[in-house]
Amino acid sequence: MRIAMRVSYDGTAFSGWQNQPRCRTVQGVLEEAAAKICGAPVGITGSGRTDAGVHAAGQVCHFDTEVAIPAPRFRECFNRILPSDVRVLESAEAPPDFDCSRSAKRKTYRYAAYYAETELPLLERYAARLGFRPSVERMRRAAALCEGTHDFAAFRATGGSAKTTVRTIESVLVTERSVSDGTVYEVTVCGNGFLYNMVRILAGELFAIGCGKEETALIAALNGGGRELLGKTMPAKGLTMIEVKYQKSPFGDGRE
């Protein structure tokens, strides 16, 4: 039986999703729990590899087991064992050929940053603080340039292993909202796939443009330019994997 799960986690104390020697990872914690539940080692596959410090509201993963537990009950079984910074939100039986990574049609990530005169403790864990107040209108104009199919090679950090750097971005939305003593800015990106650190680099460039940088470097980067054209990679803590969509959701709730 193949089990699909939708998982949420606070990435602050994790060294990312993927198993690493002597490191606390989300995959490792889930596999430890699965081994206790199933009575044998279980390999868990994730829909994507989030980096150290990156959070998830809707990571999807799957594993195979012959344990006679109704699929929806795995959520409860896992949550009794898991530490407080990771939770299974849903569990369901998936078709044998379902692959949470290869079957994914699009993914959505959100980068959060804020502007305030001083650090705000209630935001610091999940958002990066900006040194200047950005123009949302400038950011939105630049964001529109990133939509569509492009070669995003300039938006990839060293260490990525993707075979191709061409990706299709369906939407890049820039929003702002006022909070006590500051303003929160969010860049939400939806696409068919992402390169290593791509969203953090893209967000960094949009914030730089919002603070006065010209769009020419962004345009050049989208037309085959190098990584040196773009601004800094934003800190991991501001990034959250929001959701993964499929042609047919394994959770049977009407979502794609």
Image (cartoon, rainbow, N blue to C red):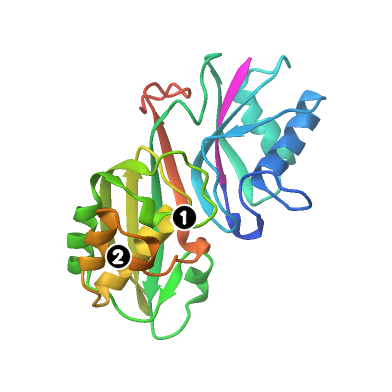
Q: Is residue 8 left or right of residue 215?
A: right
Q: Nearer the viewer, residue 145 or 6?
A: 145
Question: Is disc 1 placed on a helix, strand or loop?
Answer: loop
Query: Does residue 13 appear left or right of residue 251 in this picture?
Result: right
Identify the residue shown where x is 33% and y is 41%: 167
Q: Residues within 10 Å of mark 1 (few under 14, many from 20)?
A: many
On residue 206, which mark appears?
A: 2
Describe residue 193's horizontal placement relative to residue 161 as left or right: left
The image quadrant that residue 231 belongs to is bottom left
Above/below status of 212 relative to 218: below
Circle 1 sits on which residue?
A: 197
Residue 121 vs residue 28, the one in the foreground: 28
Q: Give the extent of the magenta segment.
A: 1-8
Q: Which mark is residue 166?
A: none
| Mark before the other along the chain sequence, 2 or 1 | 1
Query: x and y percent of residue 253 in the render?
Result: 41, 25
Q: Give the quarter of the image for residue 175.
A: bottom left
Task: Name the residue located 46 percent from the left edge and 55 percent from the top edge.
Answer: 197
Identify which amino acid the numbered label 1 is placed on: Asn
